[in-house]
Image: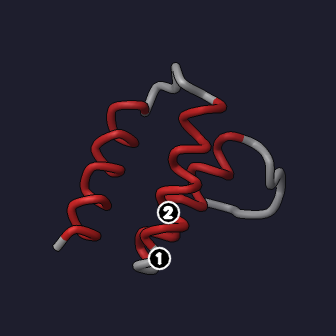
Amino acid sequence: MALGLEPNSPEEIRDKGILEDRLLHYDDSLKYLNQYLEINPNAEDVDFILELIRSIRNKINQ
């Protein structure tokens, strides 16, 4: 996961979202992951990303 090579590429946006989740920055994570799905709604990893979003929302609501 190399960040910064193409900051506006869907993959970089997705990776920022995953990184923000790991850093416990849930609001930023959701922002990036939702942006990724808007840009790339038919991504191969859409199921994984949707599950990650659900998981983050559950963490926020605990």
Asked whether 5 or 22 is in front, the reply is 22
Q: Are marks 2 and 1 in contact (CB under 8 Å)?
A: yes
Q: Amino acid at mark 1?
A: His
Find the residue positioned furthest to the top. 42
Residue extending furthest front? Answer: 61
Residue 50: percent from left, percent from top: 35, 39
Q: Which residue is mark 1?
A: 25
**Residue drawn where x is 80% and y is 47% of the image:** 8
Image quarter where the C terminus lies is bottom left
Q: Residue at x 52, y 44 (%)?
A: 34
Q: Secondary structure at mark 1?
A: loop
- The structure residue drawn at horizontal position 35% and vertical position 50%, both measured from the top left corner, is 53
How far across and how far down the image is residue 3, in percent?
A: 71, 63
Q: Residues within 10 Å of mark 1 (few under 14, many from 20)?
A: some
Residue at the (21%, 61%) spot, across then down:
58
Label 2, secondary structure: give it.
Answer: helix
Give the amino acid at mark 2. Answer: Ser
**Placement of the N terminus among the 4 image quadrants:** bottom right
Pointer 2 residue: 29
User: Residue extending furthest left?
Assistant: 62
Q: Residues within 10 Å of mark 2 (few under 14, many from 20)?
A: many
Q: Is residue 25 left or right of residue 36?
A: left
Q: CA distance from mark 2 to mark 1?
A: 6 Å
Tell me if 3 is positioned left or right of 56 in this view.
right
- Residue 10, by quadrant, is top right
Figure label count: 2
